[in-house]
Image (cartoon, helix red, strand yellow):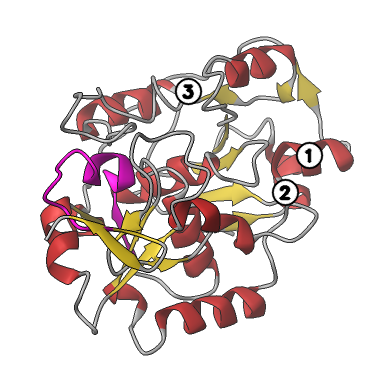
Amino acid sequence: MTWRTVVPVDAVVPHVADPAWVVVDCRFSLAEPERGEHNYIYRRVRGAVYAHLDRDLSGPVVPGRTGRHPLPEPDALAATLGRWGIGAGTQVVAYDDAGGAFAARLWWLLRWLGHDAVAVLDGGWTAWLAAGGPTAAGAESRPPTAFVPRLRPAMVVDAAAVDAMRTDGRRRLLDARGADRYRGENETIDPVAGHIAGAVSAPFAANLGPDGRFKPVGELRARYDALLADVPPEGAVVYCGSGVTAAHDILAMAHAGLEGAKLYAGSWSEWITDPRRVIEIGDSQARGG
């Protein structure tokens, strides 16, 4: 069986030593960028390699032009994936300790490069420990292989495309950040508060239950049907602060059978680099024209 969205712990445990499976630890902290890797070295899923959000899953930041986590160059990402032992037939499982907030970034990137056999571990590191999944310490390496990217450029949109569609009733722009940041409250990460004008609040955390696992498919489907209204999923674009947690909404939609939503990879941190772009605080237009 190929896992393409979310995978339970009990389906992964038998494959920790399977050469056809690669588990990737994506633990990360925006406040302490090296903490995730330190935690990985201390204790991790047995056989797992480590993906650093800044170093492995993002490209170089260009101040004043890009967001905080630009997409990596496809060839550079392909080389990293091959170094981890991920090839055409590999089942990839990504996990973190943040409800899939960072693991979903790797899930989306692999699909962007044409690799569909990738899933996020439901419940992540906490669920793995609770189930008694095998663990180990120290860094892990896998036999390298060749990863050949088959880029899907239609999965991502740029700021110009967002500006053109944000007032189009046939499209829907979803903001995956917390509702307080969407409203322009408690902004502690980016220098400008608010949201892209016309966007609808869709916090990624609402995809999860109290146990940190994804809500049942029926609940996720109802949530996104309501958010999308009459807009088909392929008419949706999702953004967040820097293009990371937005992938969580796209994952949840795909898990619920709503495939085709696109990512605005630059997200809020890129949008605000141009003062001509329209933003809102609460429900009021605050800047731009």
One can see residue 265 in this view: no
- Neighbor class of circle 2 (other Cα within 10 Å; few <14, some 14-19, many 20+) is many
- Which residue is at a point 19% across and 79% down the rendered structure image? 168
- Which residue is at a point 20% across and 75% down the rendered structure image? 167
The residues bearing labels 1 and 3 have C-alpha atoms spaced at a distance of: 19 Å
Assign the N terminus to one quadrant of the image: bottom right
Tag 3 secondary structure: loop
The residues bearing labels 2 and 1 have C-alpha atoms spaced at a distance of: 6 Å
Which residue is the site of mark 2? 123
Q: Is residue 280 left or right of residue 119?
A: left
Tag 1 secondary structure: helix
Mark sitting earlier along the chain (1/3)? 3
One can see residue 200 in this view: yes
Give yes or no for contact between labels 2 and 1 (Cβ–Cβ under 8 Å).
Answer: yes
Which residue is the site of mark 1? 126
- Expressed as whole percent of the image width and height from the top left, the position of residue 14 reads 75, 42
Camera-side residue of 26 and 119: 26
- Which residue is at a point 46% across and 58% down the rendered structure image? 183
Which residue is the site of mark 3? 52
- Neighbor class of circle 3 (other Cα within 10 Å; few <14, some 14-19, many 20+) is some
View extreme (bottom): residue: 230
Which amino acid, by three-letter code, is at mark 3? His
Which amino acid, by three-letter code, is at mark 1? Thr
